[in-house]
Image (cartoon, rainbow, N blue to C red):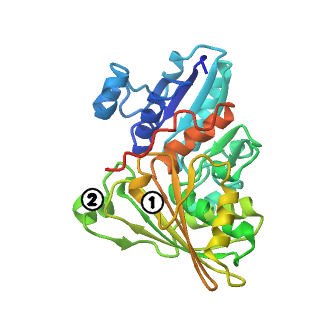
Amino acid sequence: MSDSINAVVLGATGYVGGELLRLLAGHPAYELAAAVSESRSGEMIGATYANLASHYGAKRFAGHADWLDSIEAGTNLALFSAAPHGASAALIAAALEAAERKNLSVHVVDSSADFRYAEQSEYEAVYGTAHGAPQLLGHFQSGVPEHVANISAEHIGHPGCFATAVLLATVPLINSGLTASEVFVTGTTGSTGSGRSPQTGTHHPERHSNLYAYKPLAHRHAPEIAALAESASGRATQIHFVPHSGPFARGIYATVQAKATTPVSEQQLRQVYADAYADAPFVDIVTGTPRLKSVVASNRCQIGIAAQDDTVVVMSAIDNLVKGAAGGAVQWMNRLWGLPETAGLTAPAPGWT
């Protein structure tokens, strides 16, 4: 990994963009060529992210019109998009056109929802807006890295943070055939999952020492989870999803419940998950229940299992900004460029966040 690959982050001033910049700062193969933000073009990265000031020094955010100036023609480009849903697709399309004019070899990983659906109509039905670049849909593949053995596209639409936590807990269960393909999910997310712009529901006085459900059985990520679960397992899956807002900044804790077709033991289920993730470097099957503090600020997922008679419970814990977004994006990009999947992602969780 001595020859560095140019890395560019679109939407670099949001929480996911900041995490991408943090992970790229320690990556052995990617060299940040541009952190793109139209609203803060020309400002120093360290002025927005004080935690990154010592690494990036005087490096500044670039605008959409000039980010390509720092990249030599004919080189390789890892393009990460952390732009919002509905805006990312058009930005990626423009970036790919500009990269083609400069003869760059490009792979894209998009952390928005714009390339998570294979069909334009499916995306537009959920998000209620026209797709920004429908001509690119056939060039993208979506799923969590652990469930896709072979990459069949040039670019990746990384699933959302809730989807990542739920899919990692659900797909081995559906694949096993031990349960019905209907699951009931409760997921609790930290406030960073709502983005950097303050909203009533994420304002600290509202969220501190508080816990509440929102959009029960009507969250827009449920169709995404169902579609990706079916794609990974080959079985149509019903997802009944109740999300919650938690009083913490980072992390997602998902609890999945299902009915077994016949009584099943915890040991049987543990073996299912151990087999499913035997080659998954970031998934840990734990004894007892997962803990957010064991995964926050890392790219790891902890999975815990419980069973009684015909009732099955699977719990998963991830960091929404890392495994659920920026870390998962880097994991995908590593695979797209033929790098070790774990490159730049092996730092353990700090534990006392």
The amino acid at mark 2 is His
Q: Is residue 28 visible?
A: yes
| Above or below, comparing residue 330 to residue 200 in the picture | above
Please report whichever mark, 2 or 1, sits nearer to the chain's N-terminal start: 2
Residue 311 image offset from top left, x and y in percent: 60, 82
Nearer to the camera, 235 or 284: 284
- Can you identify the residue that label 2 sits on? 203
Contact? badges 2 and 1 (CB < 8 Å): no
Which quadrant holds the N terminus?
Answer: top right
Nearer to the camera, 119 or 21: 21
> On the picture, is 140 further left or further right than 187?
right
Q: Is residue 90 visible?
A: no
Residue 240 image offset from top left, x and y in percent: 57, 75
Residue at the spot x=65%, y=51% of the render?
Answer: 146
- Element assignment for label 1: strand
Residue at the spot x=67%, y=65% of the render?
Answer: 271
For disc 2, the neighbor class at 10 Å (few under 14, some 14 to 19, many from 20) is few
Nearer to the camera, 101 or 181: 181
Residue 224 image offset from top left, x and y in percent: 62, 61
Residue at the spot x=70%, y=69% of the render?
Answer: 174
Nearer to the camera, 34 or 121: 34
> On the picture, is 283 further left or further right than 66?
right
Disc 2 to disc 1, C-alpha distance:
18 Å
Residue 252's mark? 1
Residue 102 image offset from top left, x and y in percent: 64, 18
- Element assignment for label 2: loop
For disc 1, the neighbor class at 10 Å (few under 14, some 14 to 19, many from 20) is many
| Above or below, comparing residue 228 to residue 264 in the picture | above
The amino acid at mark 1 is Ile
